[in-house]
Image: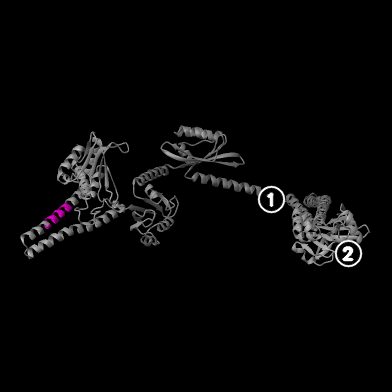
Amino acid sequence: MVADLTRLYPRLIAFATFIVAVLTGLYLMIGRADEARFSKQEQLHQTAYLFATAFEREVHVMRSIPQILHAQFQLLGPEKFTTAFPSLALDVQHSFQRTGVIIALAPAGEVSHAYPGAGEPLLGVDLMQGLERDSILRAMSDGPVVSKSWSLIPGEQMLLIHYPVFHPGEHTFWGLITAMAPMNAILRQSNLMQLSQYSIALNRTLTNGSEQTFFSTTMPADEALSLNHYMDLPDGDWQLQISTAPVDYIKPVWLSWIVFSAGLLALTAYRLSIQPQKLRAEVAARTSELASHDKFLNELISSLPVGIVVTDTFDAIRYSNPVFNRLMSRSVEEGESLVSLLEDVVDNANMRQFLVSRISLDEVNFDVMVQVGEQEFSLTCSHIDTVQGNLLVWVFRDITEISRINRTLRSVSATRAEMLRLIPDPMAFFNKKGELMESNPGFQALFAGLVDVEAGFSCESFEKQLLANSAEPDRLKPVFDLTQPQQGQLHVDAFILTAHPQRVFERTVCFDNSSNTVGSIMYFRDVTDAHEVDRMKTEFLSTAAHELRTPLANIFGYTELLIKAHFDARRQEEMLGVIYSQTRRLSNIIDDLLDLARIESRAGGAFKFDHYDLSQLIDNVLKEMELELRSRHLDYVITNDNFSLYCDADKIEQVVENLLSNAIKYSPQATPISLFVGVEAREDEPGFILRLEDQGMGMSEEDLEHVFDRFYRADTSGQIPGTGLGMAIVREIIQHHDGQISIDSEPDAGTTVTVWLPRRQLEKNKQLEISYQTN
């Protein structure tokens, strides 16, 4: 009997649970339905009030429109009012912001004007039909008449408001001013289009007892949730009938859900009461499984190559693996303090203090480095929540070798960066992906403004921008078209950037020689000077050959004539004089070329500096040129100063001699030559100035641009002797003395040459001389 009751007990519990759950669900559902019905009633009252208020406002606004137009009619008269009707209607419509209202003008009741264009179907319609005389008479005293609904557009009801108009000053009927609007437009203007969920009927009872329906919907209505609302409007009694759609508050699906939920609760109660032994067995199996997992995790942690220790929030050790025990050089006992252990082995006092503050403030989940003896460790701390409370897991990773490698890499990187900085030529490194890794200042300066040089931009993008900014892209494109990097070097002879049209660059691309390419190096070298030297050398050889060929041809021709023909003594003397003159010219050209070459090379002791008196050097030149200056007037002015100059005396005398020789040759004999010597400081450095001025043929701006070129002569007639190398020699000598030279000249107005030489201190010039001789 007891056994039968025991077997029956779970079923009784399940049945009782089912009955209670069903009854509870029904009670809650019925209560919810009552609450919903009451809420619907409250909402219906609020909706009716809002609708009635909004509709009353719209009707009053529409009644005001014909009243205002009637006032204009009385002021303007019939003819002017009819003419101005469109503009007046537009103004009134915009004043009330009712663009959906149609305003019609109907003389004698027949519509003649309608505004806006949507009212064109009204034209010619007789609005007097259906209007009773008493309505018109009532409008004379009470204002506009609200007409019954009328369909202008099929399927859409219109609300019409008529205002009878009489001739000004008379009682003779003239016509009607009518305002009309679709009911849907009135609802939209009143923000009542959302009432589509309600059943609505708008009725009016006239004074004669007849009823008019202005608006109604055909939705099914719930009689239990409906009400009538009376509105304060003229022309009859207005009534709003509103109700909600039928609502089924007790739905079959809810009943099904109640029954289903009750069945689930009953089933759950049955299973809980009939299977306690199974649940206990399952708990035991899970406990055994967790113990097995715990053992597995312990063995796994013990085999890891990192030190692991687990502590609670009070710094007491709960667990430590063998690696941590070896790190501490002993077996760590449970309950020991981790900070105390670290204080025995960690050398960094700041690190110990940091760990103490971290634990005391419970700031966990961090990663720092500590040093134990000669070993370096990465110490990571993480926070975990367990059933036993909050625990901290500390992981010690040996990073001694990694740290050594990192220090070596940083040293190599710093050395490479310094080498890059010291290399003047532009250079850039790209990784295997073609991304810029590093570039030196020369590379950034060269491509500033041309290429967006920033870390991470690709080699492909750089090459495209370089092609776009190259004056000769055809020379670069074959190299960029290579799809695979080649081992060794790819070399481009030369190219010109558009931003540096006077500069020529060489580009070299280097790749790793191993089978696995790790990146590339781009190296650029400015070869502008080398190209310029090659050009100048070619130009010089061409010009020198031409200048040497002319006297040699004269010498060869006259010598051949003397050998092959017989001339009298006078003719022979003339021909020998020409040969001597051309030989002397040839010798002067060679001497000037040798002087210029020695000066430019700065070798072979070309300059011998010492302290000299500049005035004495000028006097020496004047004595040597006494014969040339005898027939000329030289205005020589020199200030009374100390003219001690550290210079090469022979070279300074050569400068003065060349300048005086040019002034004599290129100016008429009757004109004077002025020479001024004085003291002048430039840029806070003391020095001397020598200014030579003549009144000769002068030079144009084009001549001044080439006056220091080799073999250039302003006189192209050939009547004035010279080699065209004198001014080039003068400039080289002045530049080697760190001086300055300038020329001011105009055609037929003479030439002024100004030379400035620094005084220079003895020690500075000795260093300069040593530098010249060394180079």
Q: Residues within 10 Å of mark 2 (few under 14, many from 20)?
A: few
Instruction: Note whether residue 273 is visible.
Output: yes
Q: Is the magenta stretch mostly helix, strand or loop?
A: helix
From this view, report whether residue 542 is shown above or below residue 708. Answer: below
Tell me the CA gap for discs 2 and 1: 90 Å
Q: Which amino acid does label 2 sit on?
A: Gly
Q: What residue type is labelled 1?
A: Lys
Counting the numbered discs, the total is 2
Q: Nearer the viewer, residue 725 or 422?
A: 725
Instruction: Note whether residue 253 is visible.
Output: no
Q: Give the range drawn in magenta.
A: 578-590
Q: How crowded is mark 1: few (under 14 residues within 10 Å), some or many (20 or more)?
A: few
Q: Which of 434 and 335 is in front in this view?
A: 434
Residue 213: percent from left, percent from top:
87, 60
Quarter of the image for residue 250 reads bottom right
Q: Which mark is residue 71?
A: none
| Residue occupied by mark 1 | 278
Residue 123: percent from left, percent from top:
79, 66
Left or right: residue 228 versus residue 431 is right
Q: In which quarter of the image is the C terminus?
A: top left
| Residue occupied by mark 2 | 130
Q: Residue at horizontal 45%, vertical 33%?
A: 348
Q: In the rendered structure, does residue 579 fall within the stretch colored magenta?
A: yes
SS state under label 2: loop
Q: In the rendered structure, does residue 127 fall within the stretch colored magenta?
A: no
Q: Nearer the viewer, residue 69 or 162?
A: 69
Q: In the orientation shown, which residue stands out farthest toward the front?
A: 670
CB-based contact (under 8 Å), mark 2 and mark 1: no
First in sequence: mark 2 or mark 1?
Answer: 2
